[in-house]
Amino acid sequence: MIVVDKEAPKITTPASVTVNTDAGVCQASGVNIGTATATDNCVVPTITSDAPAIFPKGNTTVTWTATDASGNYSKATQVVIVVDKEAPKITAPASITVNTDAGKCQASGVNISRASAIDNCDIKSITNNAPAIFPKGSTTVTWTATDTSGNSSSATQVVTVVDKEAPTISHTNVVVNTDLGKCSAIVGFTAPVVADNCGIASVVCNPPSGSEFSKGTNTVTCTVVDTSGNSAKTTFTVVVSDKEAPKITCPADITVEFKNTNGVTVAFTVLATDNCPGVQVVSVPASGSVFPIGTTVVTNTATDASGNKTVCTFQVTVLGAKGTKADLLKEMKAIRPTVTDKEAGKKLDSAIEEITESLDPSFWINQTHLNPKTGKDDFDEERDAVTDLQVLQSQSKKHNIPIAVIQGWIDRIVASDRLIATIAINDAATVKTDAKCVADALKMISQGDKEASKGNGNSAIVLYRNAWSAIVSCKGDKKCDGDKEDHDDSHDGRGRCDDDHSDWYKNWWF
Ligand SMILES: [Ca+2]
Ligand SMILES: [Ca+2]
Ligand SMILES: [Ca+2]
Ligand SMILES: [Ca+2]
């Protein structure tokens, strides 16, 4: 009998095995998966498996087979799981530096490039957390690579945004007037207008607002610095104008006696001050000019360096013969009480009386002209006064009036009479009175001058009187033209033709 074994073995597989991929590859080798066991009713069965030498990532089903001697077999399976726990290797792009966008304190559209990554298996994604817009400063961008098994790794990149945009600054020019009484001004000006894409750190002006600016054009420089150290400058002008007029002080009105027919040289001082240097005074007529007999208004203009003007006026009165005599009469009267000697007092009284009489208004037309009809008497009063004064000089032991003072009176009386005669001659010459009359009168003046220089004042006066009388009574030999008649309506002793009426004589009564 043949016994046939038809009973298959019983097989038991090892438990499932889970292993990691080998380093750097997406598979596992040398995996210890264990060994299946089997029993059989006859002999020990043979056990085999289809396990590969290298397991790929993922699940691999290994089939074990147990075979007995009769060819009966059983199969069973085991799962070998290969997992990838190896993280990718990532390299972030190089750190970069970019400028802010124009007018903004940030940068957009920045090209940050791209990270690179490798994995033992496969990279699923490379991501970053970069913002769309980078603010000024440093931003760390984190790049992350993730493999197909969910392992990930990160690397960082720094994106730096710098502000290289300079700030802007402007200021308008300033125009002010000088402070009262000063050639400068304390000027407070507004802050400059500044702007920056990021922020302003400081604004400084030199000189600063509130400084003292001198007259003229001053330049102020202002500097703005932004929070990144970029700077800009602007300049503007502070123009300080002097509109303050100068101050001028005129002297009091001046009254002086004549020196000659032209008048007398008069000097004076006009004071001017100004808030600024350079004030100048112009007087018309100027100090040191010869002022004519009569009253002249002196107009004084102070002009400062900026053209501001202030005017003051005063009068210069140059006394002619009449005023000069009135002056010395006052002096004589004032000194009279000092003379106690009877005889000397009598002489001075006499001179005072004669001068007083000589000033009788009926003699005078004005400061330099005597009434042609009565003027001769005036000269005679003067002559007598001079004679008395000369005696007074000889009585020097009887009074204390200095001889020079008395001589001064004499000289002024003589000069006054000479003036009257000379002006009468000048007037006559102007209206073309007969030349012979003029020449004769001038000759007498010259003779009078000789007497005066010898100290004979009274003789000089007589000659001046004669010269004056001759010229005012000159009939001349001038013939009137055509039907113009020879008139002497004024009874001044001077013949003239009709068309002469308004000439020199009339002017006397002006
Ligand atoms: Ca069997
Ligand atoms: Ca991996
Ligand atoms: Ca800036
Ligand atoms: Ca001024």
Image (tube, rainbow, N blue to C red):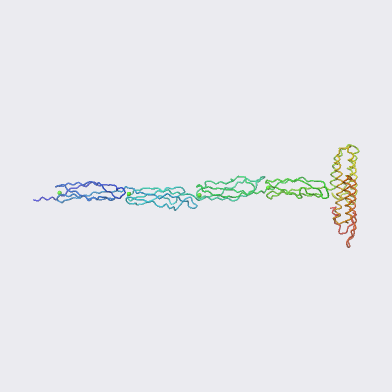
Query: Residue 17 location, x and y as percent?
Result: 26, 47
Query: Residue 84 location, x and y as percent?
Result: 31, 48
Q: Nearer the viewer, residue 361 or 112?
A: 112
**Quadrant housing residue 435:** bottom right
Instruction: Left or right? Give the position of 395 relative to 186.
Output: right
| Outermost residue to the left | 1
Count of numbered marks: 0
Query: Residue 460 location, x and y as percent?
Result: 89, 47
Q: Nearer the viewer, residue 57 or 28?
A: 28
**Quadrant housing residue 349:** top right
Q: Nearer the viewer, residue 119 or 374?
A: 119
Query: Residue 279 location, x and y as percent?
Result: 70, 47
